[in-house]
Image (cartoon, rainbow, N blue to C red):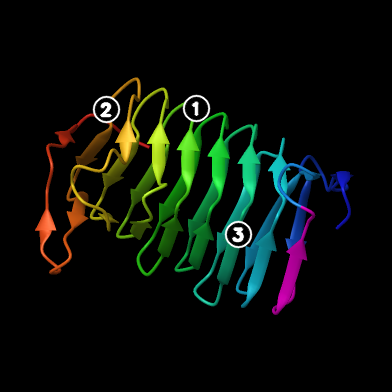
Amino acid sequence: MDEGVHEIVIVGNYKVLNVTCSNITFVGKGKDQTTIRGGFQVQNQQNVRFEGLAVMTSRVGLSFAGSETNVDVLKCVVKECKYNGMVVDGGATVTATQCEFMENGHIGVVCDNANTKVRLHDCKVHHHGFDGLVAYDHAVVDLYGTKTDIHSNKRFGIFAFDNAKVNIHLPSQHNTSHDNVGEDRSQNRGGSIANINADGTFTHVPVVVDDDAEY
């Protein structure tokens, strides 16, 4: 896609493009040059890729669902959506690399359901109305890269509950989640947030256990 602003045609009350085929790539000229006003939805499609785009002003910027879904998101920014930046559920597998999720109304990245797997490499997640990263209902999220930065969200930086796991593949001294209005890390109902050491062992840094917090 060329430089400039591209509008997704409104379907009902939603500006969403439903991706209905596998093996497709959406490539822009860069997140500062190609803007999509609207969101993308992928369900049970494989080898879908988004690269070099700014996705904004939808209800949800990126929505990926289904056990057959496999998506890569590279060097994109998702911002100013009414609710959430990226939602991954239903057993989908998603990898986001060098992406930025910012200034969405509720949450930057939401991951839920068993067999849902999300990897975030060098991603920035900040300035959301509620939380930066939320994982629940047995979802597994892995964070990689020293440029990973989750900050300035109005409630929690990272929130894991209902047996979800957030694995941080960085030293415990890395400032992964910081300067959030509520807590930087919060977990309840079996949720787990831990740093993974080079030898494969876990380090559980101090985490707030908030039995009242809910998604």
Q: For marks 3 and 1, give the one nearer the viewer.
A: 3
Q: For marks 2 and 3, give the one nearer the viewer.
A: 3
Q: Earlier in the sequence, mark 3 or mark 1?
A: 3
Residue under pointer 2: 183
User: Residue 148 at what x, y percent from top left?
Assistant: 40, 46
At 33% from the left edge and 31% from the top edge, which residue is drawn? 156
At 74% from the left edge and 42% from the top edge, which residue is drawn? 32
Q: Earlier in the sequence, mark 2 or mark 3?
A: 3
The image's mark for residue 34 is none
> Where are the magenta residues, as a range?
19-29
Q: Earlier in the sequence, mark 2 or mark 1?
A: 1
Q: Nearer the viewer, residue 71 or 75?
A: 75
Q: Assess whether mark 1 and mark 3 are in contact (beta carbons under 8 angstroms).
A: no
Q: Is residue 155 above or below residue 37?
A: above
Q: Assess whether mark 3 and mark 2 are in contact (beta carbons under 8 angstroms).
A: no
Label 2, secondary structure: give it: loop
Res. 51 visible in picture: yes
User: Residue 179 at what x, y percent from top left?
Assistant: 33, 24
Residue 105, magenta (yes or no): no
Residue under pointer 1: 127
The image's mark for residue 74 is 3
Label 1, secondary structure: give it: loop
